Image (tube, coloured by chain):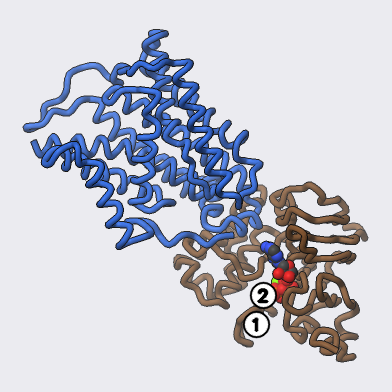
Amino acid sequence: MLYQIILSGLTVGAIYALIAIGFTIVFSTVRIVNFAHGEFVMAGGMIYAYLSAVHGMPVFPAVAIAIGACVVLALLVYELGLASMDKDNHIAQVMITLGVGITLKGLAQIFIGKDTQFPPAFSAGGPLAVGGATIPYQMLWIVGALAVLMLGLYMLLHHTRVGKGMMAVSINHYAATLMGISPRRSAVIAFMLAGLIGGAAGTLLAPVASAHYDNGIFLGIKGFAAAILGGLGSPLGAVVGGLILGLTESVTAGYISSVYKDAVSLVLLLAILLIRPQGLIGKRLPQKF
Amino acid sequence: MGHEPVLSLQKVCAYYGNLCAVRDVSLEINPGETVCIIGPNGAGKTTLLKSVSRVIPKVEGAIRYRGASTAGVAPQALVAHGLIHVPEGRQIFPSMTVEENIEIGAFAVPGGVRKDKTDAAMDMFPKLRERRRQLAGTLSGGEQQMLAMARALMGQPHLLMLDEPSMGLAPKVVSEIYRQVDLLRGRGVTILLVEQNARIALRNSDRTVVMASGEIRHQGKSADLLAGGLIASLVFGK
Ligand SMILES: Nc1ncnc2c1ncn2[C@@H]1O[C@H](COP(=O)(O)OP(=O)(O)OP(=O)(O)O)[C@@H](O)[C@H]1O
Ligand SMILES: [Mg+2]
């Protein structure tokens, strides 16, 4: 029982972590909280489900196309909605991302449909039995994807020119500009990464928890909570926050009642923010331009 | 190298919203020259440098860098062509190490970070070499200014703009910084310097421009101004 609870907590937590990373990358590079981010995750799952159910596409092409579509979607959201916007007009940015989110949800409803769908798991075959617990293969895919994507992100940020530029932009936008780094290019890359990782989270989650046009808000809120819990702006914080949130929910649901799982995680979130307003891993916010 | 000025400004005005912070400034800087701008707080010195590096949106008038107009040019493109701006207040990257800060200075340079250039930058300020693995945010004010300069040199400046490099530093550190400025002048780097300390400014430049309330009030050879004692009356009131 305990094993099972921990395993499912980690799986859900890994999904939250993947969603949280998208919030964090965009926030630290562009200083925008992208309220449409949950819809990227929804879109990943929905497009994957659509391609495999309606077109009978095999798993990996369908997943790749779904993720690619989310990358393009994120790019468009930035280029068309946010790029030319006054970067100090935070209210307008919030309104735009909210509006984009509602639009994406509507588009998914119209073009893909209102049915709840369960696209196939990434690999066939029954669950593994380990000790007293059973582990569906999809769980391994989810946790594995988190590990691979985190490693890739780490390499990008610390060992490539583009990544170092993004780090510089996130620390001090003005100084980065004076070093010849383009904040706008960094923003584009941040949004594309958010689309990629968010879309991946959507495809990974859909086989175990369904794809539905209305899932985006819920997923966005969970991912945002995880990002804040870990410290908005820190990718490692996003992972820690996601896993803690997932575990808290599953322990609460397993030992108390699933009715309370959201309440307990909210209390946890508030408690941690009272003690450490910058989140668990977060540093003080980088200085503003 | 032609005879055209490295930088030429004609009737440049800069605005923050409706506030005009720089008004009708015309100025030329020739190759190898060091020009210093002095003036009281709020005179528009920093705004003028920001106009040249194109980091503020509302700039009117003609600015030409190495013969070409910079209207509509992105700041990154100017940096890539050697127009390097060391901003007021240093603006180092506190959560990166000293070495990472220096390396990021070469971001826009074709070919990227070169070991010999990093070494040369750290040779200028040996303190930085000792602290290369330390987080830049933990450096003292003087060391941060040195880091900001070392980082700027990585960009291989053709025109170097320094905004108040002596701000808040002890005299000993100030002279260390200006020793390096001297070396750069010796190497033929064109420099546009902003200073509040008139004495330092006059001693370390060929020409001095006095600004107040966004306008140029006076300009002349630094040596003449130093001899004439004109500055005090201009800058610190009638
Ligand atoms: N970001 C900004 N928004 C609005 N007004 C600004 C901004 N930056 C500067 N100003 C105003 O523009 C004027 C010129 O400022 P600037 O920073 O260029 O002066 P300065 O000569 O560099 O002064 P200091 O010696 O104190 O650095 C001031 O009146 C200032 O209040
Ligand atoms: Mg200034």
Q: Residues within 10 Å of mark 1 (few under 14, many from 20)?
A: some
Q: Which residue is mark 1?
A: B174
C-beta proximity under 8 Å, tags 2 and 1: yes
Image location (x, y in percent) of residue A189: 54, 39
Distance of mark 2 from mark 1, alpha carbons? 8 Å
Task: Locate residue A60 relative to residue A267 in the image: left or right.
Answer: right
- Circle 2 residue: B165
Toward the viewer: B10 or A246? Answer: A246
Extreme residue toward the right, this view: B3
Q: Answer with the quarter of the image where residue B211 lies.
A: bottom right
Q: Residues within 10 Å of mark 2 (few under 14, many from 20)?
A: many
The chain letter of the brown chain reads B
* Residue nearest the observer in this picture, B18 or B191: B18
Residue B66 in the image: x percent, y percent? 84, 55
The percent position of residue A201, horizontal first and vertical second, equals 37, 31
- Using residue A108 as the reference point, say whether residue B69 is left or right of it: right
Chain of the residue under label 2: B
Whichever of callouts 2 and 1 sits on the residue coming sooner in the sequence is 2
| Front-most of residues B122 and B75 | B75
Q: Is residue A82 left or right of residue A15?
A: right
Q: Quadrant location of the N terminus of chain B?
A: bottom right
- Colour in which chain A is shown? blue
Ligand 2 near label 2 (Cβ, under 8 Å)? no
Q: Residue at x 35, y 36 (%)?
A: A148
**In the displayed structure, does residue A264 sit left or right of residue B35?**
left
**Residue occupying image coordinates x 56% and y 49%:** A90
Q: Same chain for the residues at labels 2 and 1, yes or no? A: yes
Q: State which chain disc 1 sits on.
A: B
Residue B58, how many percent across, how many down?
A: 77, 54
Kind of residue sitting beneath label 1: Val
Q: Residue at x 90, y 61 (%)?
A: B11
Is residue A134 among the parts visible in the rendering? Answer: yes
